[in-house]
């Protein structure tokens, strides 16, 4: 499989060199360019799979260049990640509004940059495959519209199933519409793998409430034959077809009367190794299926599979977006919120406190003499200690409270609807919990104990008008706690 090609446009030689090296070390083909003109030249030569574009370059405005790129049909689906040292509140909004896929602030973090590059390369692949699937579906529609009355029924089905529905919803919609178009009372979608003994019915026209019904395939020879052979199975009459010779004997012994006369079983494959059978049946009071019915059913399932694959791609893309958003808001070591995410939450809580005449408290927690842990035991043990502290804080706070990693060995706890006495008492409880906790790692080291100093800031308060003001007030209180001898709380 060919490696992904990434075009990097930046006028800073050090950034260009470091990004190029990082991406090449991780298996990507990288084309570095210095400036906007060189970037356009490389795009004209060969379109990459992804573009990393600096916002500020001497010979071009990165945002204007982005707008030009996105207005060109050739590069409409090209994922563009903007790099900038500008404040994200300004640059990210403008970039995303012009069609950028993401915004990365300089100086970048290598792991975050790689994670975002990987995510957007996947999404780019999904988007291209989705557009191709849609084109093929539209082509199938055009051909169907030129056919006879049965083909017009297919058009009705496709018009309905190409909406923004989940895969499960598409299965249920497909069996309803196909059953009506074919004039049958029994229509199902069954998922299974070749060689398996059982299968799962995920949708059935005759039983709309049915969900995830497990059946044994030895009782349904048409399903087993379709799965094993990968070919359509047409049974005009169950009473005479040799495929049912064994089960007819069982039906006779058990006294079972089968109301079904005729069956079509169409195997299909969708992404991620999922196999299934589109099963339609007619009862004894209906005409048996013929070759024309089989042809129409094949057209339905072929077009429907393309739509189902599109729905799976959309669901996968949404999941990737959710994971990317989680990555952007989470500290990778402790899995707590990072400072950026907490800042957004504090802003909302400050507005809420003013609106409802309430108070909130911010605790800034610093581990005393933490450098000694790294110097004595190593950074791996230091990382374990930070994770332990994070868990300790999460276990201590209330449901309404928010805990985040501020950076290094500092943590933040936001306490909504808390007065100064309550905040000071809560902070002292955290201080005591840290002091009493044994951070020893599985007995490999002597007993490891730590203490913490905590600064508390309240809001509303004089000269606190922003989140940064609140941070500064908590930091000043923390400094006093350190100066007064550590292992204490200061308000």
Image (cartoon, rainbow, N blue to C red):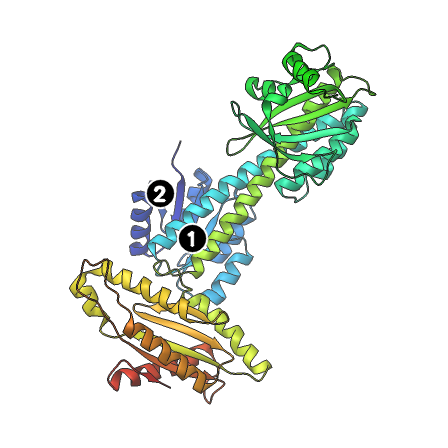
- State the residue lying farthest toward the bottom: 462
Check residue 354 in the rendering and tell me which mark sits there, or answer none: none
Query: Is residue 181 left or right of 491 when viewed as pictured?
Result: right
Q: Residue at x 32, y 71 (%)?
A: 410
Q: Residue 54, located in which quarter of the rendered image?
A: bottom left
Q: Earlier in the sequence, mark 2 or mark 1?
A: 2
Residue 458 is situated, as x and y percent measured from the top left of the image, at: 45, 84
Residue 313 in view of the camera: yes
- Total marks placed: 2
Residue 40 in view of the camera: no
Query: Is residue 363 left or right of 142 when viewed as pictured?
Result: left
Residue 452 to residue 25: above or below: below
Q: Residue at x 40, y 50 (%)?
A: 115
Residue in the foreground of this view, choosing between 350 and 188: 188
Q: Secondary structure at mark 2?
A: strand
Check residue 53 in the rendering and tell me which mark sits there, or answer none: 1
């Amino acid at each position: 499989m060919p490696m992904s090609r990434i075009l990097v446009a930046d006028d800073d030689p050090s950034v260009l060199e470091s990004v190029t090296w990082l991406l090449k070390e991780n298996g990507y083909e990288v084309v570095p360019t210095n400036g906007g003109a060189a970037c356009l030249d490389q795009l004209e030569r060969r379109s990459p799979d992804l573009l990393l574009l600096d916002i500020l370059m001497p010979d071009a405005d990165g945002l204007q260049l982005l707008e030009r790129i996105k207005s060109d049909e050739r590069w409409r689906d090209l994922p563009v990640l903007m790099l900038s040292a500008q404040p994200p509140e300004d640059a990210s909004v403008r970039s995303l509004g012009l069609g950028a896929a993401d915004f990365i602030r300089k100086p970048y973090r290598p792991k975050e940059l790689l994670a975002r590059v990987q995510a957007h390369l996947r999404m780019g692949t999904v988007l291209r495959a989705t557009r191709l699937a849609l084109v093929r579906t539209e082509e199938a529609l055009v051909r169907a519209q030129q056919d006879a009355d049965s083909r017009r029924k297919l058009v009705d089905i496709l018009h309905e199933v190409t909406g923004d529905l989940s895969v499960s919803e598409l299965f249920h919609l497909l069996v309803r519409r196909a059953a009506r178009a074919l004039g049958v009372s029994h229509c199902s979608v069954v998922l299974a793998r070749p060689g398996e003994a059982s299968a799962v019915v995920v949708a059935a026209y005759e039983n709309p409430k049915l969900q995830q019904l497990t059946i044994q395939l030895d009782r349904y020879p048409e399903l087993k034959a379709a799965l094993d052979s990968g070919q359509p199975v047409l049974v005009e009459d169950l009473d005479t077809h040799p495929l049912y010779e064994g089960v007819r004997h069982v039906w006779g012994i058990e006294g079972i009367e089968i109301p079904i006369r005729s069956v079509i079983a169409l195997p299909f494959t969708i992404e991620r190794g999922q196999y299934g059978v589109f099963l339609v049946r007619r009862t004894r009071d209906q005409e048996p299926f013929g070759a024309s019915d089989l042809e129409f059913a094949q057209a339905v399932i072929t077009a429907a599979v393309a739509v189902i694959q599109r729905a799976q791609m959309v669901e996968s893309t949404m999941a990737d977006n959710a994971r990317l958003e989680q990555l952007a808001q989470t500290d990778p070591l402790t899995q707590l919120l990072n400072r950026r995410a907490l800042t957004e939450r504090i802003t909302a809580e400050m507005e809420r406190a003013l609106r409802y005449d309430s108070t909130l408290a911010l605790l800034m927690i610093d581990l005393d003499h933490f450098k000694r842990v790294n110097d004595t035991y190593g950074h791996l043990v230091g990382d374990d200690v930070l994770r332990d502290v994070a868990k300790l804080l999460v276990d201590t706070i209330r449901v309404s409270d928010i805990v985040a990693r501020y950076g290094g060995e500092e943590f933040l706890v936001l306490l909504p609807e808390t007065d100064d006495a309550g905040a000071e008492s809560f902070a002292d409880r955290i201080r005591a919990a840290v002091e009493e906790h044994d951070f020893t790692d599985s007995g490999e080291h002597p007993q490891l104990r730590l203490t913490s100093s905590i600064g508390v800031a309240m809001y509303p308060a004089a000269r606190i008008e922003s989140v940064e003001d609140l941070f500064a007030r908590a930091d000043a209180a923390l400094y006093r706690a350190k100066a007064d001898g550590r292992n204490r709380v200061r308000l």
